[in-house]
Amino acid sequence: MDVDERTTADHVGLREKTITVTVNGDSYQRTVPVRRSLVDFLREDLGLTGSHVGCEQGVCGACTVLLDGEPIRACLMFAVQADGNELTTVEGLASGEELHPIQQAFWDHHGLQCGFCTPGFLLTTYDFLREKHGATEPEIREALSGNLCRCTGYQGIVRSVQAADETWER
Amino acid sequence: MKPAPFDYLAPADIEETLDVLREYGDEAKVLAGGQSLVPMLNFRLARPAVLVDLNQVAGLDGIQAEDGALRIGATTRQRSLERHLSSRPAGGPQDLLRQALGYIGHPQIRARGTVGGSLAHADPAAELPAAVSALGATLVIRNAEGTREVAPDEFFEGFFTTSLAAEELLTEIRVPPWPGSTRGAFLEVSRRRGDFAQVAVAAVVTVADGRITRAGLALAGAAPRTVQAYSVVDGLVGSEPDAGVIAELAGNFAAELDPPPDTHGPAEYRRHLARHLLQRAIAQAAGLAGPRAASAA
Ligand SMILES: Cc1cc2nc3c(=O)[nH]c(=O)nc-3n(C[C@H](O)[C@H](O)[C@H](O)COP(=O)(O)OP(=O)(O)OC[C@H]3O[C@@H](n4cnc5c(N)ncnc54)[C@H](O)[C@@H]3O)c2cc1C
Ligand code: FES
Ligand code: FES
């Protein structure tokens, strides 16, 4: 690993840092290279591979996680920046074998095909429906505008969100 | 791709940040929301030796509203400002700021992206530079030696270029109060939801006793930097709001623009957008069209 590569500044600050984060209610402490993205940290250091890496430039939304309750791009944050924070990933949605009502709705209404984009859509939907009841289709489309899906054509996803709006007791 | 190695510093206060910037100058880059900088790091378009994280710096974020003025700390998240403005009565000039924020990317982007970061990045098609220009905001800049305050026109110099020196930090944005009878409007055309503007117009207009007494107009996407429509402001001030006058002023201004052509269309298309959006935004802010006209009727 090239954590030890030198730059002109020659270690003025940190190249590695020990951080503590809470993910889906569990606390983890790890030492990470400072340039490791939050999504790579979740996948590679914690083995939580539900968050996906698509574009690494904030465009696709596959890496969306909740940081202190707010959806963010985990590819545009470094893991060290999440030190002391709380994260929710897609692994935190289901309780045991029982799918979250949003996941069930995606299952029932063909909200996914390959599933690559799905974790991001689920967490974005979670944040959106938490505050919103009785969402209209334009509102749903607006809320999902920051997540890209190459398979479904979005129709099934919009229907899934409409269904979850009704089935999720919150 | 992954960023090239860097040293990471997370100073706790503004003074410490300024000391670090003085020490490392060009070798350092400050990290605010990371929504523009991190993609550049990931693709190694930027390779700073030292990354100075502003997210732990105390006193650099926050919103203070008093007597119609607004002070916005540089690291205030775009979504926080949006929420703050949405919780206040609509109708004033700051409406345009709220509308402009709504056009920036998506909620996930605004949850991290900062107000100061957008201004310092100075994308010619970004919404906030146009919004603060039209509102006549003051940008507060500090280095280890002191503080300077600049108008938007002295700040935005060109394509992704500002007058910020390497050891300087944008610390605050001050939006001045406008007279009570002032309205704002922000209109944009983009290819898709969340994209940068092809052209966007920010308009602030004060109408008193049936005449326009003050105005601020700025455009995004119409030139290599955000531009203010001074000739249109000069033509409007003192006159009665009149659709014909507005159309003529907007047409003359747009004809002089020389926007860069891109894959989305030729320069003529952007001139066309500039003309029509200017016309509509002024009409809305002056009460000739849109919400205000409807409520007056
Ligand atoms: C998918 C996507 C869509 C987007 N769409 C839009 C859009 O439609 N419109 C739009 O305007 N933007 C858009 N953005 C960019 C977004 O608004 C960024 O938030 C903004 O451009 C930069 O703000 P930031 O806080 O993230 O800054 P960063 O990315 O952290 O920094 C940007 C630059 O500014 C410098 N900087 C930051 N803060 C300061 C400071 N206080 N003093 C001095 N220098 C500073 C940094 O060193 C860096 O050079 C989009 C981004 C993404 C990923
Ligand atoms: S991988 Fe983060 S937005 Fe695409
Ligand atoms: S289901 Fe394949 S990308 Fe969305």
Image: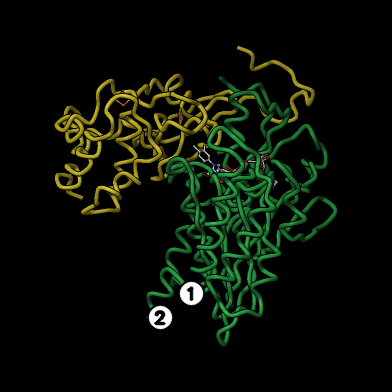
Chain colours: A yellow, B green
Measuring from the top left, give residue B150's x and y in whole percent: 76, 59
Residue furthest to the bottom = B209
Determine whether, in the image, residue B90 is placed left or right of residue B35.
left
Q: Quadrant of residue B228?
A: bottom right
Query: What chain is tagged by disc 2?
Result: B
Residue name at image x 47 percent, y 46 percent? B111
Q: Is residue A162 above or below residue B140?
A: above
Q: Quadrant of residue B215?
A: bottom right
Q: Is residue B117 above or below residue B215?
A: above
Numbered mark located on residue A1 in the image: none
Residue name at image x 56 percent, y 19 percent? B1
Q: N-terminal of the two: label 1 or label 2?
A: 1
Which residue corresponds to mark 1?
A: B287
Question: What is the three-letter code of the residue carrying label 1?
Answer: Gly
- Ligand 1's image quarter is top right
Which residue corresponds to mark 2?
A: B296
Q: Secondary structure at mark 2?
A: helix
**Proximity of marks 1 and 2: CB atoms separated by less than 8 Å:** yes
Residue name at image x 39 percent, y 29 percent? A62
CA distance separating discs 1 and 2: 8 Å
